[in-house]
Amino acid sequence: MENKQNNINEEVILDEEINPCDESQKGHRTGFLGFIDRTADAFYNFTDNTVVRVVLYVILIAAVLVLPLITSNYIVQIGWNAMFYMLLALGCNIIVGYAGLVDLGYAAKFAVGAYTSAILVKTFGWNFWLTLPVVVVTGIIAAVIIGGPTLRLRSDYLAIVTLGFGEIVRLVAINLELTGSASGISGIPRPSIFGLRLTNIRYWYYLFIVLVVLFVIISNRIKDSRFGRALTYIREDEDAAEAMGINVISYKLWAFIVGTVLGAIAGAFYAMQMAAISPNSFQFIQSANILLAVVLGGMGKVPGVMAGAAFFSIFPEIFREIGEYRMLFFGVALVVVMIFRPQGMWPDRRRGRSKKRKKVMP
């Protein structure tokens, strides 16, 4: 009974510490900022109803599944690209959103997976599906090499190290003959599944739906586990977490490994779909976009991270007809969100639960 009470108190402490939308932690905002908060609260209250959520999920799932059947290949390609960014953002969210680490070289992580799979398939004639275990092992090795000696550093220094690692991977790919040098690797054979060769973008669209669902399940399982709660404590106050007996370095390294492996897996599928990769695909701008998608959607919030990734991939395409001005509008939209909604676009769903617990707890 005592252990159960301690677990409840631990959850309440977590809610009170990490909830950015709790009015007990910040003053009541007025004007336009207050309007933004009230809009987020209204959205939360509307979707807090189970029936409403089920209806919205059914509509969303139906729209996603039907899209390739009623649209052109161009629209399907945009949808596939959005889901690819979702995979990367979900992987980066393990490192940045859950563990609170700053990673400016996430593009290198999916580059490791992309080149590993591409080399094994194109150069050595492996079946793509057999390369995935090797991709996982390669991702673990890369995470341990970069994370082992550097995760003792604070966020500023870690950001510099990950940025350097991203550039090192890209430069190595440019100079190695095995990776195709600056030209990269082209003509990668596309894989088959149950005898069906994945040559149509619509096949890849549905395959990536499955991948997104798997990544979401993994993210939610981590978030709701003891491992996820430990990462939350570390993110909020590393010194306090260490004083409580949490092995900070070990948990941070495991978060780094999981995030890297997810990125490597996404990179492997990216290489197969594109049938060609080059070092230009893994520049720093890619890492910045992935990180911004996590921050924009809301660090640690799985639906928010997915929304941020979709925004980054779809918004520029909507305004493609106005040429270079679309990037101006894109930048303005980012600035507006970061100023008026710094905790991310997605509202915090734990606000209501935190308030309810405060009422019943002595």
Image (spheres, rainbow, N blue to C red):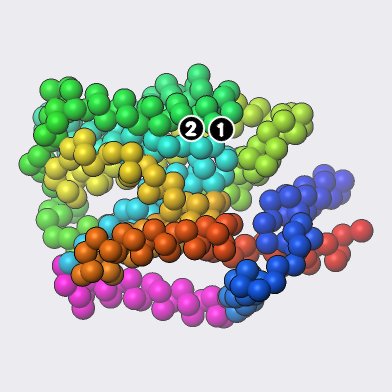
Circle 2: residue type: Ala
Q: Quarter-wise, where is residue 230 in the image?
A: top right
User: In the picture provided, is 333 more to the left or to the right than 18?
Assistant: left
In the rendered image, the vertical position of residue 128 relative to residue 309, given as above or below: above
The magenta segment is 47-73
- Mark 1: few/some/many CA within 10 Å (<14, 14-19, 20+): some
| Residue 121 image position (x, y, % from top left) | 15, 35
Q: Quarter-wise, where is residue 351 in the image?
A: bottom right
In the image, 121 versus 255, the foreground residue is: 255
Q: Mark 2 sits on what residue?
A: 159
Q: Residue furthest right?
A: 362
Spatial CA distance of label 1 from label 2 is 6 Å
Q: Is residue 247 magenta?
A: no
**Main structural element of the magenta stretch: helix, strand or loop?**
helix
- Mark 2: few/some/many CA within 10 Å (<14, 14-19, 20+): some
Tell me the quadrant of the picture where the C terminus can be found.
bottom right
In the image, 327 versus 352, the foreground residue is: 327
Q: Mark 1 sits on what residue?
A: 155
In the rendered image, the vertical position of residue 281 relative to residue 55, given as above or below: above
Residues at circles 1 and 2 in contact by the CB criterion of under 8 Å:
yes
Q: Which residue is rendered at x = 17% and y = 40% of the image?
A: 277
User: In the picture provided, is 74 more to the left or to the right than 85?
Assistant: left
